[in-house]
Amino acid sequence: MTQSQSALRKTSDAYCDHLAAKGWAEADKGLAGFADLLIRGRSASEQRAPAYASDIGAGSRAPVLVLAKISADSESARKGLENVTLEARQVLDRSKSVTSNRNDVIAYERALVRAQMAHRNFLEALEIVSARADMDVTPIENEIAAFAASIDEARRVADDLAARYTGSYGAAS
């Protein structure tokens, strides 16, 4: 069980690092930054112009290129989250009668928060490019919606991990 939990932490941390390296979500600012993000929802630096949209040129580059970038980035972020969620499910499956490790819960929830940040950034960039281009953005909206569905599933798994940590998993139906 320790091995699978360690794998979940590693996978979650790698996902967070990947999102930050790609500019899809802010880098981890430690426990205090994470707590602030959970309490306030957005950090002070996010209140300014959306960095992702600016980085990909959502307001200036050719719309077709920007839309392709948003779609590819959303798909990559979604697949990465699905990989982390698979790892979290394996922890749940392997530890039916044992509580989750607190560090696993924290690592997975951190990955979930970063995925939500990336999702929000993709939506903001799509909104900016859509305002200046008369194009069908349905395929990109569908990809971002698929990412949102993966986030919702990850949220359910995070709830199960947290319940397992507190010992209440499966206690109430």
Image (spheres, rainbow, N blue to C red):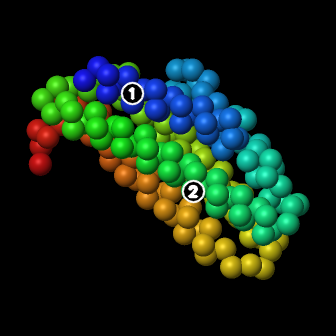
> Which of the two labelled residues, at mark 1 and mark 2, occupies the earlier sequence position?
1
Residue 114 lies, in percent from the top left, at 55, 39
Task: Identify the element where label 2 is drawn.
Answer: helix
Q: How far across and how far down the image is residue 73, in percent? A: 64, 53
The image quadrant that residue 101 belongs to is top left
Residue at 61% across, 39% down: 19
Q: Is 100 on the left-hand or right-hand side of 24?
A: left
Q: How far apart are the two marked residues, 1 and 2, measured between alpha carbons?
A: 23 Å
Reading the image, the residue beneath label 2 is 75
Q: Residue furthest right?
A: 60
Q: Is residue 50 above or below residue 8?
A: below
Quarter the N terminus occupies: top left
Q: Secondary structure at mark 1?
A: helix
**Which of the labelled discs sits on residue 7, or is there none?**
1
Direction from residue 64 to residue 103 in the image, left or right: left
Q: State whether residue 26 is above or below residue 4.
A: below
Name the residue located 18 percent from the left edge and 37 percent from the top edge.
169
Please tell me how many numbered marks the rendered image carries.
2
Q: Residues within 10 Å of mark 1 (few under 14, many from 20)?
A: some
- Residue 49 vs 140, above or below: the answer is above
> Does any portion of residue 164 appear in the rendered image?
yes
Q: Residue at coordinates 49% horizontally, 62% vertically from top-left? A: 146
Give residue 85's position: percent from left, percent from top.
39, 43
The three-letter amino acid code for the residue at tag 2 is: Glu
Whether residue 166 appears in this view of the structure is no
Do residues under tags 1 and 2 come within 8 Å of each other at their CB atoms? Answer: no
72 to the left or right of 134: left
